Image (cartoon, grey):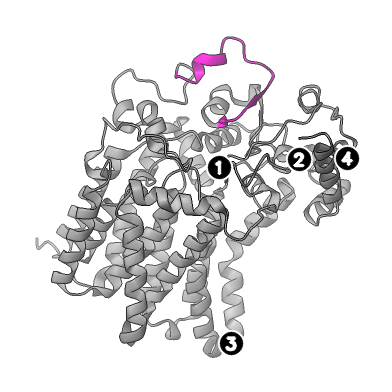
């Protein structure tokens, strides 16, 4: 039997990237926030954090639903998620290889070499977060757009398919839609004159997944967006358009990951050159437009406390742009060698930083080497050792703390492992606001100075712990007391009660904002 000439290139790429991701695989604390919601969902409590309070604590509905399907069968979180992530990495290369049919057969190898050298991409291809699913959807979207038939000839069905992929990207992580939005807008403009009103029908069909989820979210949770959006973005109180922590986040990546940002910059420069000189390759501007939009967004919100996490997607878009343009084997070899040399300058290059991975020293910007923080207890190479418990078991390092006498309600910051271990029996009040609808909407302490986007601390209002423990509103501040009455109706009241929908409208349209402002003013008067 004759072996297809392109198959060895694909198998070699899967082996190389698969080894790198497997050797670096780990799982942090944040994914266990989602895992607790999944556990509640599978056991009949609904997709919630505290079972009797409807709060969407996860940012990635599609990832949560996918993992829920597997968790329903395995009833195990860690290895289920690791297996799913590794399978998606292989799927990513298969989708990319299929898209590259019209390109040189070594194109998939070039893409793999560039991906393997990126600390950001390799480390967040596991971690328990939604990155691997986002990457597959984005490559599928651009594979169809860049390497398929000309967009101007696209049928209504193809337009609906592209829109549906963008819709799924949104459901996997709302801000990731920035990666595909410029390209989708361009495609819709290109076909609008020929398809006319059928474009509207195609968009309506394609956006149905996002619209249906949003409708469910409003009815069930009371809000169109995850609770984490209010917590991480300080309830919309973001201040200046360029967050001062953004520069530090970029600078940290340049110190710890010598390939990712330089490769993105090189791809953007290549795109500018192509735009001027090579008319036939100008479609390369579509993924690069998405990369630029996501980088601008990253700077706007001040980055993240997880080093490199928000650069994995722009890196993937840049790799797509490079393999789209480069057709000369000598140029490809030079790019691959340059990327490999840059990667070799990393403190811990992905290909040689496996089971013995040490924690990088603290960074003055406040950005953390997240993998280093958790790898000793959650690295896949560590946990496949016989008899080694995973971080989400009661015998693990978090489980040993309070399991002898767990309280009914507890204030806790890093809620992932803790919340998953104790499950629905312990009401966890998160002073970062990620899982708490009230705390998420309170003003944060020093939002411009604290390292934020998920680490914005709030003061727990007097009377709030008694309120959740006793099931009645005992908040002392009168303005916040009234606001909490409305919020409780949204998050704990009967779903189909008319008064609840009135409260949903009041809170989402800002009619209750003056109560939060009055509470904030009271804090200032008291010197907080």
Q: Nearer the viewer, mark 1 or mark 2?
A: 1
Number of numbered discs on residues: 4
* Mark sitting earlier along the chain (4/3): 3
Judging by the rendered image, the residue that carries numbered circle 4 is 479
Judging by the rendered image, the residue that carries numbered circle 1 is 451
Question: Does residue 400 appear left or right of residue 258 in this picture?
Answer: right
Judging by the rendered image, the residue that carries numbered circle 2 is 491
**The C terminus lies in quadrant:** top right
Q: Residue 132 location in percent, x, y?
A: 40, 50
The residue positioned 49% from the left and 84% from the top of the image is: 190
Q: Which mark is residue 196?
A: 3
Sort mark 2 into few (<14), some (14-19) or many (20+) by Cα contacts within 10 Å.
many
Q: Nearer the viewer, mark 4 or mark 3?
A: 4
Q: Which residues are magenta?
A: 396-415
Q: Is residue 207 above or below residue 150?
A: above
Distance between the Cα atoms at labels 1 and 2?
Answer: 29 Å
Q: Is residue 220 above or below residue 463?
A: below
Q: Residue 500 location in percent, x, y?
A: 84, 46
Q: Quadrant of residue 522?
A: top right
Q: Nearer the viewer, residue 4 or 269?
A: 269
Q: Nearer the viewer, mark 3 or mark 1?
A: 1
């Amino acid at each position: 039997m004759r072996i297809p000439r392109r198959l060895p290139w694909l198998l070699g790429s899967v082996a190389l990237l698969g080894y790198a991701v497997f050797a670096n695989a780990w799982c942090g604390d944040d994914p266990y926030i989602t895992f607790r919601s999944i556990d509640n969902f599978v056991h009949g409590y609904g997709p919630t954090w505290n079972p009797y309070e409807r709060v969407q604590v996860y940012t990635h509905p599609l990832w949560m639903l996918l993992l829920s399907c597997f968790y329903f069968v395995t009833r195990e979180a860690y290895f289920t998620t690791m297996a799913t992530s590794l399978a998606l990495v292989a799927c990513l290369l298969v989708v990319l290889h299929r898209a590259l049919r019209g390109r040189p057969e070594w194109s998939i190898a070039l893409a793999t070499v560039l991906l393997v050298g990126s600390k950001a991409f390799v480390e967040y291809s596991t971690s328990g977060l939604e990155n691997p699913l986002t990457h597959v959807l984005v490559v599928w979207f651009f594979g169809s757009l860049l390497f398929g038939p000309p967009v101007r000839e696209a049928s209504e069905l193809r337009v609906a398919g592209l829109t549906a992929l963008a819709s799924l990207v949104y459901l996997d992580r709302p801000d990731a839609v920035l990666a595909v939005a410029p390209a989708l807008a361009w495609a819709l403009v290109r076909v609008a004159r020929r398809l006319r009103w059928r474009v509207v029908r195609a968009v309506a069909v394609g956006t149905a997944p996002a619209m249906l989820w949003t409708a469910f979210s409003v009815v069930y949770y009371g809000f169109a967006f995850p609770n984490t959006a209010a917590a991480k973005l300080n309830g919309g109180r973001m201040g200046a358009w360029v967050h001062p922590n953004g520069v530090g986040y970029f600078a940290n990546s340049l110190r710890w990951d010598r390939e990712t940002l330089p490769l993105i910059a090189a791809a953007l420069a290549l795109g500018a050159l192509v735009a001027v000189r090579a008319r036939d390759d100008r479609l390369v501007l579509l993924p690069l437009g998405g990369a630029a939009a996501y980088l601008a967004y990253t700077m706007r919100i001040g980055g993240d406390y997880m080093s490199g996490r928000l650069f994995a997607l722009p890196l993937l878009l840049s790799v797509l742009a490079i393999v789209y343009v480069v057709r000369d084997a000598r140029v490809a070899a030079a790019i691959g060698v340059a990327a490999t040399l840059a990667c070799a300058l990393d403190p811990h290059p992905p290909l040689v930083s496996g089971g013995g991975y040490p924690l990088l020293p603290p960074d003055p910007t406040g950005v953390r080497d997240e993998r280093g923080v958790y790898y000793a207890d959650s690295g896949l190479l560590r946990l496949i050792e016989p008899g080694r418990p995973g971080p989400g078991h009661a015998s693990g390092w978090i489980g040993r703390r309070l399991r002898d006498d767990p309280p009914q309600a507890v204030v806790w910051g890093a809620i992932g492992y803790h919340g998953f271990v104790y499950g629905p029996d312990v009401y966890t009040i998160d002073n970062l606001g990620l899982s708490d609808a009230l705390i998420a909407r309170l003003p944060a302490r020093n939002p411009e100075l604290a390292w934020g986007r998920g680490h914005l601390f709030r003061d727990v209002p007097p009377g709030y712990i008694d309120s959740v423990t006793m099931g009645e509103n005992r908040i002392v501040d009168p303005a916040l007391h009234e606001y909490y009455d409305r919020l409780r109706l949204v998050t704990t009241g009967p779903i189909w009660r008319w008064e609840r929908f009135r409260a949903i409208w009041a809170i989402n349209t800002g009619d209750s904002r003056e109560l939060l402002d009055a509470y904030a003013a009271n804090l200032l008067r008291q010197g907080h």
